[in-house]
Image (cartoon, coloured by chain):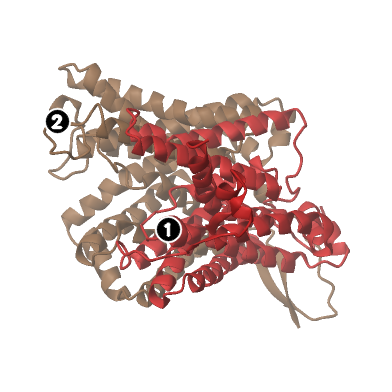
Amino acid sequence: MKLTIEPRLSSSWRLAVFIPVFSLAAALFSGGVFLYFMGVSPFQAYRAILTASLGDAYGLSETVVKAIPLTMTGIAVMLSFTMLIWNIGAEGQIFVGAIAATAVVRFFYTDSRPVMLIMMFLAAGAAGGIWAAIAGFMRAKWSVNEIITTLMLNYIAMNLLNYFVFGPWRDPSSLGFPMTPPFPDTARLPVFWGTRIHGGLILAIILPLLFWFVLKFTRWGYEIRVMGENPRAAGFAGMNYLRNVVLVMFISGAIAGIAGMCELSGLQGRLQHGFSGGYGFTAIIVAWLARLHPFAIVLVSFLMGILLVGGETLQIVMRLPLSSIMVLQGMILFFVLGGEFFRKYRIRSVKDDDAVPLQAAPSGEEK
Amino acid sequence: MEIIIPILTAAVRSGTPILYATLGEIITEKAGILNLGLEGIMLVGAYTGFSVAYSSGSAWLGVGAAFLVGTLMGLIHAFICVTLKGNQVVSGLAITMFGTGASSLLGREFVGFTIPGLSRIPLPVLSDIPVIGPVFFNHDALIYSSYILVLFFCWFFTSTRPGLNLRAVGDNPRAADAMGISVTGTRYFYTLLGAGIVAVGGAYMSLAYTKMWGELMTAGRGWIAVALVIFAIWNPARAAFGAYLFGGVEAFQLRLQTAGTTIPTPVLMMLPYLMTIGVLLFISIKKGKGILFGAPASLGAPFFREERD
């Protein structure tokens, strides 16, 4: 007897549901074991996470507040991942979007709330889009590795934000804290139901629907899916790779930038140091766990929202650093990757003298 | 000269963690495995090195522990990428997230402590050479071992049987397999070894560079190293040149800050990252004209023994 690995020829929807759920459960279990060995009680930690995020109406609303930027940014990176362009720079695009929106408030202030908000929206989208399109253009034109450039642009955006909030835009009455003065009400998105849930919610609902439709039913959506799966075939079919990479990165960055603007205008009301809290990175997990499906992104964002609200609670109640939630995020990714294996292959035991049947090659998405 | 020598000396010091990380990534990539987890591995290495050195009083025990923990992180990556044939980009990101979180979580008890760290050992005779002496031979032993490592890998890749086998696995795993080289074994070995060396780079940060532990203290150096591998076209000697170039930018930037320049700090802090993009752009445009070689051909692609290409 020995074990062989062979590709699955078809994948059932049951596996497609069961494997991510199982991966998530396994990750939470291993994360618990890890926490235990770090001297943190996993039961206490998970209970704190769950009660804080789902225990009451306030907790639930806070989870939604986290899920809004995650959904938007998740859609943003999903779009580039679909094309196999690795936009790891959503964090930086969130920053420049927020910086641009703040600039609009400072320099083009008007008393009309709709005009103000639309201008902020456009500025944030343009800034985030251009920020990402730089990396996209260099990738498509000269094959400059976009993982590195988008990441470096993150650090540059972070320092750009620091420059403004420590320097020229600092609120003189902030007692030295690196933040701008609070925005006037005309530059704030409306909030709903007496919670902190803000107007970004509408975008977090529309964007998944929009991009589900675009990817599934439009010619352009078809083109970028083909380019992700087989760039050579796309080239033979006369699809313009350069233009599409730049366009996809622009849209991806624009959505991330707008997510930054929503966070700024809907939630925080001023630009400050340490503004985003890693949404751009968490979005990568969201998109991957959702297997790049727009609706699944909404669901996974909500789950990640639970973790993030829980992470803040851990910080306050159990005095753990905020980044410790990244342990769980990393674990989840490990197990999702492991789970992918069982979705694509099956392990069979065969007798030694059995010839292993040759199977068709698995899909080339890894290449 | 009086101004240049301290900056060059500092360039070697601040370039060393990046050099270790770049060397580690080069040997892993030579085997065909892309490890984007450098940032996380460096952080874990920095934490492990510091905590062990602090608790035991021996900086070298810290270096050894960092190496071991680094290989464990490499083992996770190798298991996902080689055995499970998972996506190497996502696995690397997961390693970075996990390492960042774990080091912050574990390191929370060590924030604010300092250690004596690695001591400076001026090499006799060599350190008396003008300019070169103080710049290269008036450092701690971990810097000297990085020189040896660079020379060793230059020789190893081109002139030894295992080195050639390694390159065969990275360039053409099918041919390597046919030659009787274990692709799986080779990839595991160099992913583990590479990650261990990367972790030593992280340990250098906490044991010699700052002599303390701080959350997120590597500040993107792991990612800069990933870019430097491309800049170095997988050549250890060029990696050293690139790492010192970046160390130089950092040293220069720090010196400007302490000299009380009117340029705001965040603008200066952008320099290394801007330079990374610039360097990568330069290399890639050159590559477009066919001057660049050296990328392992199977980089990032899992190997399926039972399948035909």
Q: Secondary structure at mark 1?
A: helix
Residue located 43% across and 71% down the image: B53
Name which residue lies at 48% across and 31% down.
Answer: A132
Residue A240, how many percent across, how many down?
A: 65, 25
Q: CA distance from mark 2 to mark 1?
A: 34 Å
Mark 1: few, some, or many residues within 10 Å (few <14, many ≥20)? Answer: many
> Residue B209 or A341: which is nearer the viewer?
B209
Return the x and y of residue B242 as percentages of the image width and height: 61, 42
Q: Would residue A229 be found to the left or right of residue A77 on screen?
A: right
On the picture, is A28 further left or further right than A201? right
Colour red, chain:
B
Question: Residue flagged by tag 1: what amino acid is it?
Answer: Thr
In this rendering, is residue A36 above or below A318? below
Task: Judge from the rendering whether residue A319 lies leftward or rightward of residue B228; answer left or right.
Answer: left
CB under 8 Å between discs 2 and 1: no
| Residue in the image at 76% along x and 64% along y | B183
* Residue closest to the eye, A227 or A319: A319
Q: Is residue B35 visible?
A: no
Which label lies toward us, 2 or 1?
2
The residue pinned by badge 1 equals B100
